[in-house]
């Protein structure tokens, strides 16, 4: 009786271990979009951290103007170039305004989670 209980317990433990192992591996896979965002982050980090507020405002306005224009369709790289730069500017804001660190972190996460597919769906279909 104890042997059956012990082997059942070991079997369940192994099943749990392997299911957690498999689940953990699937979460670590990066999409092509994630890899593009990482590359752009490395490429633009120094530039964006040196932005002043006027330069950031110009970038932000340019992005929204292009994003909302029904005649302009940004490429995936253009879209992520804007969103990554906007996200990276949050690091500069954290350094300038330490009391606003939580807000800056939240904004960075928001901008880094922007998806190109969502942008495409928001564009009217061209016929």
Image (cartoon, rainbow, N blue to C red):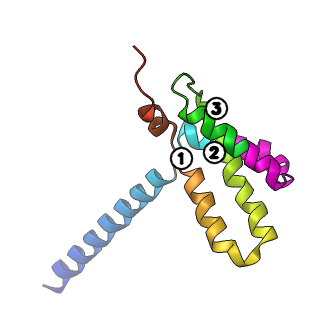
- The picture quadrant where one finds residue 36 is top right
Q: Is residue 125 left or right of residue 12?
A: right
Residue 44 appears in which quarter of the rendering? Answer: top right
Q: Is residue 5 left or right of residue 45?
A: left
Please state which of residues 41 and 23 is positioned toward the viewer in this rendering. Answer: 41
Q: Which mark is residue 114?
A: 1
The residue that appears at 23% across and 75% down in the rendered structure is 7
In the rendered image, residue 46, in percent from the top left (x then y), is placed at: 85, 50
Query: Label 2: which residue?
Result: 83
Pointer 2 or 1: first along the chain: 2
**Residue for point 66% across, 53% down:** 87
Q: Residues within 10 Å of mark 3 (few under 14, many from 20)?
A: some
- The residue lying furthest to the right in this view is 50
Residue 76 position, x and y percent, is 58, 31
Q: Magenta segment: does it hold 82? A: no
Q: Are marks 2 and 1 in contact (CB under 8 Å)?
A: yes
Closer to the eye: label 2 or 3 = 2
User: Label 2 to label 1, Cα distance in Å?
Assistant: 7 Å
Asked if residue 59 is positioned above or below residue 3 in the image, the reply reads: above
Count neighbours of disc 2 (C-alpha within 10 A) and say few if under 14, some if 14 to 19, many if 20 or more. Answer: many
Please state which of residues 57 and 12 is positioned toward the viewer in this rendering.
57
Residue at the spot of label 3? 77
Residue 82: x %, y % from top left: 67, 41
Q: Main secondary structure of the magenta part?
A: helix
Q: Which residues are magenta?
A: 39-58
Image quarter where the C terminus lies is top left
């Amino acid at each position: 009786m104890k042997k059956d209980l012990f082997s059942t317990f070991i079997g369940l433990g192994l099943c749990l271990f392997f299911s957690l192992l498999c689940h953990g591996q699937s979460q670590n896979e990066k999409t092509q979009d994630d890899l593009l965002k990482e590359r752009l982050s490395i490429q633009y980090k120094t530039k964006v951290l040196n932005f002043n507020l006027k330069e950031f405002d110009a970038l932000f306005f340019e992005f929204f103007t292009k994003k909302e224009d029904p005649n302009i369709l940004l490429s995936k790289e253009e879209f992520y170039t804007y969103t990554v730069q906007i996200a990276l500017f949050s690091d500069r804001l954290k350094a300038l305004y330490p009391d606003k660190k939580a807000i800056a972190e939240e904004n960075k996460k928001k901008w880094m989670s922007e998806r190109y597919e969502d942008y495409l769906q928001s564009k009217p279909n061209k016929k």
